[in-house]
Image: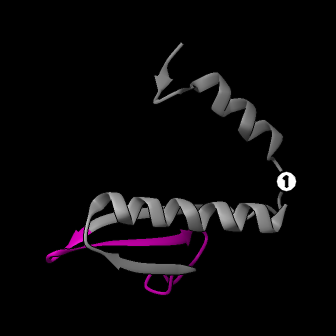
């Protein structure tokens, strides 16, 4: 069984199976360095305009960008549940 971080592939497959609804919004976060800052955004894989994400921000560190993106994903997940 393959392990990714603390989750196994079988755990991720169960999560996917629980979320096989056509009306689900599948978001993803991107984190990358932009000059001296770290950029984070959240987008939808079906969005035809990736330059217009659902949310974005610039941060001084990679960790701060990752924490902010995770917080935004969590907010969206709990508000749509």
Q: Secondary structure at mark 1?
A: loop
Question: x, y (%) of residue 60?
Answer: 25, 72
Q: Residue at x 49, y 65 (%)?
A: 69
Find residue 35 and report its image quarter: bottom left
Q: Nearer the viewer, residue 32 or 69?
A: 69
Find residue 51 and report its image quarter: bottom left
Question: x, y (%) of residue 8?
Answer: 57, 23
Number of other residues with Cα within 10 Å of mark 1, as a class: few under 14, some 14 to 19, many 20 or more: few
Whether residue 45 is visible to the viewer of this picture, yes or no, is no
> Is residue 49 positioned above or below 34 on the image?
below
Q: Residue at x 74, y 30 (%)?
A: 14
Q: Residue at x 64, y 33 (%)?
A: 12
| Residue of label 1 | 21
Whether residue 30 is visible to the viewer of this picture, yes or no, is yes
Question: x, y (%) of residue 62?
Answer: 29, 60
Q: Is residue 40 left or right of residue 61?
A: right
* Furthest residue toward top: 1
> Is residue 3 positioned above or below 25 on the image?
above
Q: Is residue 51 magenta?
A: yes
Q: Which residues are magenta?
A: 33-53
The total of numbered circles placed on residues is 1
> Is residue 55 positioned above or below 16 on the image?
below
Q: Give the position of the C terminus as an image quadrant.
A: bottom right
Q: Give the position of the N terminus as an image quadrant.
A: top right
């Amino acid at each position: 069984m393959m392990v990714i971080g603390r989750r196994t592939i079988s755990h991720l497959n169960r999560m996917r199976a629980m979320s096989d609804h056509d009306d689900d919004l599948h978001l993803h976060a991107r984190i990358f360095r932009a000059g001296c800052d770290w950029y984070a955004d959240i987008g939808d894989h079906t969005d035809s305009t990736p330059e217009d994400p659902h949310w974005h921000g610039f941060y001084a560190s990679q960790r701060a960008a990752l924490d902010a993106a995770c917080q935004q994903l969590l907010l969206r997940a709990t508000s749509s549940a």
